[in-house]
Image: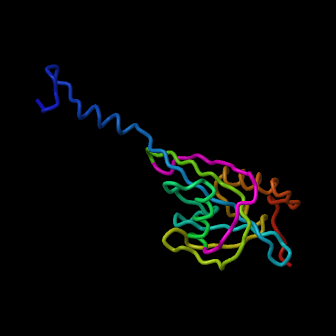
Amino acid sequence: MSKRANKHNYDFENKKAKRRKYEVKHERSCGAIVFREIDNELRVLLVQHSASHWSFPKGHVECGETDCETAIREVKEETGIDIEIISDFSRASTYSPYPGAQKTVTFFIGEYLGGSLRPQLEEVQRVAWLKPEDSMKYLVFDRDREIFSDALQEIAYKGNPNSESKED
């Protein structure tokens, strides 16, 4: 009989381990959908994450940070550029990145202030300014596409992000 078993041979340690197995770890991240004009055309910033999918820059909230501060810091760390949050727009995506975890990512709308694109290679493979129409093709997650569509509506984008762009 184990040290923690009682007279009915109940194994408390095994019970605790089973309970831990079903506990869900909650994670919080924030990021930004960053816009700028290049040659009088709207562009959006996308990053190719190490897992190979394309999305918007984002990362974990650090102790003492607001969500907007996290988004601004993460964009700078992952892409090398400075932004400002330009509206009250806020959309969340919740998913399970791995078994036993639930992650909520809150996205804001950011505007480019300055800096040169350079990927933080520990976090992302590539960074790019893309036309909205092209960006929609790269986003693999439905919720990312929904949030991006909402952001385009928020900034009153007049194009059709679901159509393919034509090369000039």
In the image, which residues are magenta? 80-98
The one of 116 and 160 positioned closer to us in this rendering: 116
Query: Height in image: 41 above or below 102?
Result: below
Residue drawn at (46%, 50%) of the image? 98
Query: Height in image: 85 above or below 102?
Result: below
Q: Quadrant of residue 80?
A: bottom right
Residue 43 counted in the magenta span: no
Quadrant into which the N terminus falls: top left
Q: Position of residue 87 (x, y in %)?
A: 76, 55
**How is the structure coloured here?**
rainbow
Q: Position of residue 152 (x, y in %)?
A: 79, 57
Q: Position of residue 42 (x, y in %)?
A: 81, 69
Query: Height in image: 20 above or below 57?
Result: above
Q: Which residue reaches farthest front? A: 64
Quadrant into which the C terminus falls: bottom right
The one of 142 and 105 positioned closer to us in this rendering: 105
Horizontal side of 28 relative to 106 (left or right) equals left
